[in-house]
Image (cartoon, rainbow, N blue to C red):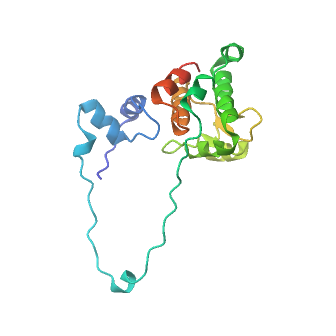
């Protein structure tokens, strides 16, 4: 991997072309330049023989597995249009939809903590945790769930975060994007 320096204006332009949370600058540039991500070969480290370590069995690594817990039909019922209209602004609608998602399955909602930006924490179990990660996070509690979310993102980013959360919980991407557009 090579590193290059870019000026602030170019960096902002590249960042503004982000289509999904966690998308790398390389992925964005490849997409914008029409290059395939599949053609990139990751450099493989050379195998180094270390006989003293070969006998040891490696410890299994824990890989969190996301469980899908909601039937697709339930996502259509996620949005109570009347209550959604009563919410104040994009932040209110964002919080309302996240709380509605929480209500679908409270026991699995902690999975939402896995949704993060490359250098950004979006969800946490406390206000302090979000403020520690970013002093300007403007954390808000999602209803009375005990989960907190950063709300200082622009509306497009809030929509992307909500859509990613919905997809993570098993919602079809098209339905998720439709729900997220209501923020």
Quick check: can you spot residue 138? Answer: no
Q: Residue at x 53, y 37 (%)?
A: 170
Vertical relation: 105 (above or below) 41: above
From this viewpoint, which residue is outermost toward the right? 144
Give 118 or 78, whichever is nearer the viewer: 78
In the visual, does 34 lie left or right of 113?
left
Q: Quadrant of residue 120?
A: top right
Vertical relation: 110 (above or below) 57: above
- Residue 23, how many percent across, how many down? 41, 39
- Residue 91, how many percent across, how many down? 65, 24
Give 130 or 60, whichever is nearer the viewer: 60
In the visual, does 25 lie left or right of 61?
left
- Residue 111, how many percent across, how many down? 60, 45
Give 117 or 163, whichever is nearer the viewer: 163
Vertical relation: 75 (above or below) 43: above
Q: Residue at x 22, y 45 (%)?
A: 39
Q: Residue at x 67, y 38 (%)?
A: 105
Quick check: can you spot residue 166? Answer: yes
Q: Quadrant of residue 113?
A: top right
Q: Residue at x 62, y 41 (%)?
A: 123
In the visual, does 108 lie left or right of 176?
right
- Residue 14, how many percent across, how many down? 37, 32
């Amino acid at each position: 991997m090579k590193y290059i320096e870019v000026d602030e204006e170019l960096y902002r332009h590249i960042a503004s072309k982000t289509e999904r949370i966690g998308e790398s600058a390389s992925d964005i540039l490849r997409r914008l330049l029409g290059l395939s991500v599949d053609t990139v070969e990751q450099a493989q480290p050379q195998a180094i023989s270390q006989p003293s370590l070969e006998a040891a069995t490696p410890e299994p690594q824990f890989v969190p597995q996301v469980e899908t817990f909601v039937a697709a039909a339930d996502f259509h019922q996620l949005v109570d249009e009347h209550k959604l209209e009563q919410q104040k602004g994009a932040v209110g609608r964002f919080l309302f939809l996240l709380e509605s998602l929480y209500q679908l399955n409270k026991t699995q909602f902690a999975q939402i903590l896995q949704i993060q930006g490359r250098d950004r924490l979006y969800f946490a179990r406390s206000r302090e945790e979000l403020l520690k990660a970013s002093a300007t996070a403007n954390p808000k509690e999602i209803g009375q769930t005990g989960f907190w979310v950063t709300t200082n993102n622009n509306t497009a980013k809030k929509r992307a975060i909500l859509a990613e959360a919905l997809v993570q919980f098993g919602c079809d991407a098209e339905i998720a994007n439709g729900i997220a557009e209501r923020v």
